[in-house]
Amino acid sequence: MVDPARVRRLNSKAELDGPVVCWISRDQRVRDNWCLLFASELAASRRVPLHAVFCLAPGFLGAARRHYSFMLRGLEPLESSLSERGIPFHLLTGDPAREIPSFAGELNACAVVCDFDPLRLKRRWKSGVARALEVALFEVDTHNIVPCWAVSDKQEYGAYTLRPKIHRELPRFLTEFPTLEPAGSWGGGGADWKAARESVGAEGSVAEVRGWKPGEAEAMKTLERFLEEGLSEYAGRSNDPNSGARSDLSPYLHFGHISAQRVTLEVSGADAPSTAKEAFLEELIVRRELSDNFCFYNRHYDSSKGFPGWAQKTLDEHRDDPREYIYDFRKLERAETHDELWNVAQQEMVSRGKMHSYLRMYWAKKILEWTRSPELALKTAIRLNDRYELDGRDPNGYTGVAWSIGGVHDRAWKERSVFGKIRYMSQAGCRRKFDVDAYIQRVDADAELEKGPASSA
Ligand code: FAD
Ligand code: FO1
């Protein structure tokens, strides 16, 4: 059922004869989940039970209450969907590198199956689990349509080098999903969600965001709404924050509430201009898989050491250029710069939990312009991105920031102060692309609404 190219072994231990454990982490969904399908196939072939487990880590790359709340509210329905299929769900808390091996040991598991994630912290968790486990650990890439290790064995220069490799493999991997067979009714499982919510130590300072409902059902509704309203305009207007031409799927893709393969299958079959579908699938498939490729093959994906040589050189040559404006972290976080467009984009991210794609590029590039060094700019952009974006702490984010500030996957442009040959963006450039004043008014109005009726009186 599951293409063997999606699966790799992370240790060389034997498979004994107890139950199979599916360790859910990046792809937190029942439907369209190759990791769960592989684990279910393994359990059925050995006629043993299948158990699912999620380990709630005390901290995760600067995640705040808004992220844990979205994630936990998305995980709760997962428990019932799994138990309907006879798969007990266990919720652990603590360091996964310790909790997963001891859970598998208590269950006398025959093997553990986990989902792929290129991030350093995840790979650290998994190498700890692979070492401590007495049994086999398998990893399944169910986040990408073409598995990350199958599409390329090295860091790609840019979308233009990855695109043909992806398109060559799509006929093999872009298939429909088999259904997940019920695993018979085995006891066990049961999560204490109240305790889980209290256990996360995330800083309470970052308020939860309203207006986002997590979970698989909500993700599908968001997709259906996009197919109806946004997709057709995607080719012409996805760079215009005033248009509805964007899917709003990123928080659901980040937490794995929906599969990119499912989105691709639905978009391909939708009644919309092919130019719109191609433009959207270029982002969803090529740009997104390019991010996983960058984080998987470049260990410095969140540092300036990960920038291409030409970019490191040019930023170095302009390191001492005078900066017209300098803002520290607090000023930026509070959107207290001289640039109203930048401030409003920052406010949109803080209040709504999601900044529009086009403005993320402008937003990050201005941080390069207004901080003392490229290294500090990178650190600041990542910290703000991962603190406020619902879809933050994701390979797309590290790659998006590295593209904006360090020329990753981009080429050299006309040299100028501070930026050197890194692509420059200006507010005038934004004004040529979309109605900046309309965007500012809309976000200000939304922020007023967010504050509730009292302040708008
Ligand atoms: P749509 O335009 O509807 O695209 C659909 C999906 O395609 C997205 O959900 C995403 O999975 C993928 N996609 C679209 N654009 C890109 C892109 N440029 N790179 C990679 N994948 C893309 N994306 C995140 O998921 N998390 C982040 O933390 C994040 N931080 C970013 C920071 C900067 C500085 C930049 C320039 C980009 C960042 N992106 C990030 C990429 C992109 O901006 C978002 O994925 C997109 O805005 C999500 O909104 P959407 O789902 O409505 O996008
Ligand atoms: N994955 C886990 O397995 N356990 C966690 O406790 C956890 C917390 C978490 C908080 C915020 C966030 O954005 C992601 C989080 N993830 C967690 C990982 C997430 O599921 C994704 O796998 C990666 O962030 C995307 O690469």
Image (tube, rainbow, N blue to C red):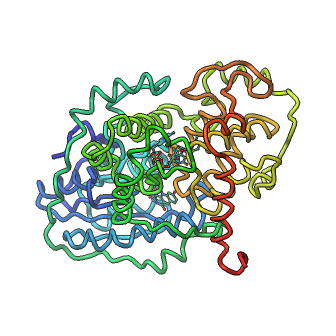
Q: In screen coordinates, is 387 left or right of 326?
A: left
Identity of the residue drawn at 33% across and 77% down: 190
Asked if residue 350 shows in the view, the reply is yes
Relative placement, left or right, of 386 versus 276 is right
In x, y percent, where is residue 374?
A: 74, 34
Residue 407: x and y, percent? 62, 28
Front one among 329 and 152: 329
Determine which quarter of the picture holds residue 319. top right
Left or right of 291? Residue 301 is right
* Residue at figure coordinates x 24%, y 73% from the top left: 83
Q: Is residue 139 visible?
A: no
Q: Nearer the viewer, residue 359 or 431?
A: 431
Tell me the residue at 51%/62% (across/down).
57
The image shows residue 78, relative to residue 411, as above or below, that is: below
Residue 434 spot, x, y in % from top left: 61, 42
| Count of numbered labels shown in the rendering | 0
Classify the position of the C terminus by image quarter. Answer: bottom right
Name the image quarter holding residue 17: bottom left
- Residue 426 screen position, x and y as percent: 72, 35
Residue 192 placement: quadrant: bottom left
Q: Is residue 226 above or below residue 433?
A: below
* Closer to the camera in the image, 425 or 410: 425
